[in-house]
Amino acid sequence: MSEKRFLFAGFGGQGILFTGKYLAYEGLLQGKEVSWLPSYGPEMRGGTANCSVIISDTSIGSPIITTHDVLIAMNLPSLDKFEPETVEGGKIFVDSSLIGRKVARTDVDAYYIPATQLASDKNLPGLANMIILGNVIRQTGVMDVADLARAMRKIVSERRQDMIDLNIKAIELGYNYQ
């Protein structure tokens, strides 16, 4: 991997920024050059949120990306807005529980993961973001699944330590989703 550009997008409250932060921190632990750039609307919960993550073997010139290799769309407005900016040959991950349409482009690989429904079914409320991230990890090879816990332990706050195992379980569920 020389450089991989990810864009996580959805509504505030879906864990978009946390998911990107987790992936960026894992990149740091791998010794890579990393950029994490969050962006959100006026309301954190319910407003739009997205973040870009760049993981590179070489220095990153700018944290601002105009195109991305991987799009994670957790709602329809995000898919509508960011699908055109995915590079040819890129990958688009869709929470098919919340997005009723298919990816329109034929020059990208599309993955449909019913992450919100899986989170509900498996009693992992609020962890659809981590379920879809698990599938991203599998399909992109951005990190080794054996390393899931190390970054999680670093970024989860002291008062939320009880969520570490649930987050890892959610990632594993998405990783194994066929």
Image (cartoon, rainbow, N blue to C red):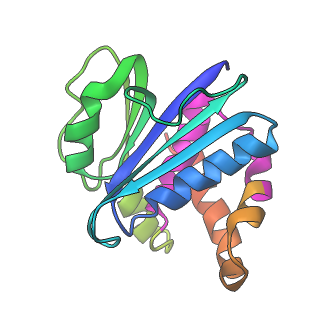
The rendered magenta stretch, by its main secondary structure, is classed as helix
The residue positioned 19% from the left and 39% from the top of the image is 80
Give the camera-side residue of 40 and 12: 40
- Residue furthest bottom in the image: 159
Q: Is residue 37 visible?
A: yes
Assess whether residue 148 is covered by the magenta stretch: yes
Residue 73 percent across, percent down from the top left: 34, 45
Assess whether residue 16 is covered by the magenta stretch: no
Quadrant in which residue 150 is drawn: bottom right
The residue positioned 35% from the left and 65% from the top of the image is 12
Q: Is residue 110 above or below residue 131?
A: above
Q: Is residue 68 left or right of residue 54?
A: left
Marks counted in the figure total 0
The magenta stretch is 127-150
Q: Is residue 28 above or below residue 108?
A: below
Q: Is residue 11 left or right of residue 163?
A: left
The residue positioned 79% from the left and 48% from the top of the image is 147
